[in-house]
Image: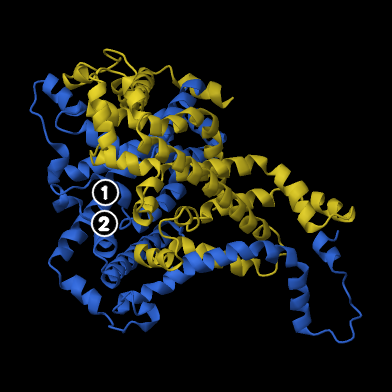
Chain colours: A blue, B yellow
Amino acid sequence: MRGPSTLTEPQVNFDANPRVESKVWRSIKRSRFYYLMFAVPLVYFIVFHYIPMFGIMIAFKDYSVFKGIAGSEWVGFKYFGEFLSDPYFYTLIKNTLLIGIYQIIFAFPAPIILALLLNELRNGMFKRFVQTVSYLPHFLSTVVVCGILVNFLSYDGMINQFLHWLGLEQVHFLMIPEWFRSIYISSEIWQGIGWGSIIYLAALTNIDPQLYEAATMDGANRWKQAKHITLPGIAPTIIIMFLFSIGAIMAVSFEKVLLLSNGSNFETSDIIATYVYRRGLVSSDFSYATAVGLFNSVIALVFLTIGNTISKKVSETSLW
Amino acid sequence: MVKTQRNLIKKSPGSRAFDIINVILMLLLVFMTFYPIYYVLVVSLSEGNAVMRGEVSFWPIGFNLSTYALIFEDPSILQSYGNTILYTVVGTAINVICTAFCAYPLSKKEFYGRGFFTLLIVITMFFSGGLIPSYLLVQHLNMLNTIWALVIPGAISVWNMIVMRTFFQGIPQELYESAYIDGSSEFMSFLKITLPLSKPILATMSMFYAVGHWNSFFSAMIYLDEKSKYPLQIILRNMVVMGEMSNQTQELGGVYAAVTATNIKYAVIIIAVLPIIMVYPFIQKYFVKGMMIGSLKG
């Protein structure tokens, strides 16, 4: 059967002199409606995604607003050198990496555990209820979550009222640098545990029920079934998600950090992304901030590549 | 069959103990998720002094609505609410139209150059210009301090576009073929076949984008500098996170003796999340579906 597109432009097989070029042209002409439609998205991607990519070149230039990007002078790796030799560089790297690593250690397994526990629930109604409630925080804005945190953790806030009631000492949580990472990671778990479990639950539905039947026949208890059937069944998904989070290790949720950081917890809360924002948009050091941002992206890409290579070797699952 | 098999095992005491612990853990999760939001609501309805004394925990003490009365007298809050609605409606319309215009051609096998364009777009998922070049672009296009800075740079989410493309691909090809035989143009086919059949995905995408606009604060923070254009999230940030109160609110605070700054902050949180919580039960399943399609094909 011939598709509508082949009908649009009747095949002129007895063309006097069919050339390769005209074949391409014919295909293009045949999909002219699609081109017309695609023009808007194409322009969008070029202008709002590819042009900024080329804009990265200001990291290697002494960008000045008056000279423009093209007119500014090339300075090579000057700004990268400046950043690397800044003593503050180590603090930033440490803060960014530590939050990223803690995120992987604590926030990454949480949805997997939840999915496994939900899978063991016998009452379907109750399961759906727990799921529905647990997705809710995902839909709250970062500002709302941080607003709740800031107020709950304030000196006269809900948490401290509770500590006081227990007879414990009140703590100025957000003023103490040591508390920052725990607060950040806990809130990430609170917001993401339910939503993150969806993908694992989807993977669980693909496991062949016969495997469980066979295991039951062989006398495997639930723990053994979970260990030998369920977990291996979702392992590919876990690996892919793990790769994503390794790649995202440098891409800490910057908005949340920005909202939770303050002068007192800067020591642990200042990360590369907030530094880029401050230097670039608050102090208008455009070239320097772009260089720092590019440095961050390159490191992130390195992490992603490492994760991908390891996974390819170990399990034959990879992103590319 | 499977069910009966699995039920047989439940007889063991260890298994039963696990079930009980599991249910308790899940109830704890439900409580931990729900209680903070509930507490915010309770505080916003309570008398200020009772909150300060730490008497409020599970139900409002000294129930009153004066905090909300006060909030709705503050013109800056009302204005920001209106702005957010405007940005959400305009932004979502642009998002959905652009995403459909992108996804439809890419869903067609006969679209010449489809592979190349898909690659061009997928690359943007992994590489981006970053904060500063994007900001400079928006500045260069004279979009600073306009609604366009908030709604155009994020017009298409590649992830959503892929989900929508997958949906379009699922529409039976025969429908288009018979429409063609009946003399329908490609544009008419899109209008009369694709769009009506895609209502569920269009609704899901609208919800995705609308929630995103409703919740977004960062682009407004960097691109807008006129107070009259601020969306709700910026006002929320200033009041709730930074602890700033507008003069208007402070003056009005004197009128309502029962209201404290804490009441106001919590009430502003509630008015910001209320629309989300109200539509949430209805839209939740669409989100999950969208997420599943995306994760399986993406």
* Direction from residue A16 to residue B152 in the image, left or right: left
Residue B177 at least partly seen: yes
Q: Which mark is residue A257?
A: 1
Which kind of residue does numbered mark 1 sit on? Val
Q: Secondary structure at mark 2?
A: helix
- Residue to which mark 2 is pinned: A274
Contact between labelled residues 1 and 2, with CB atoms less than 8 Å apart: yes
Label 1 lies in what chain? A
Nearest the camera: A310 or B199? B199
Nearest the camera: A154 or A7? A154
How far across and down, in percent of the image, does residue B117 sit?
60, 67
* Direction from residue B93 to residue B14 in the image, left or right: left
How far across and down, in percent of the image, does residue B216 sit?
41, 46
Mark 2 or mark 1: name the one nearer the start of the chain.
1
Residue A119 at least partly seen: no
* Direction from residue B287 to residue B199 in the image, left or right: right
Pointer 1 local density, CA inside 10 Å: few below 14, some 14–19, many at least 20? many
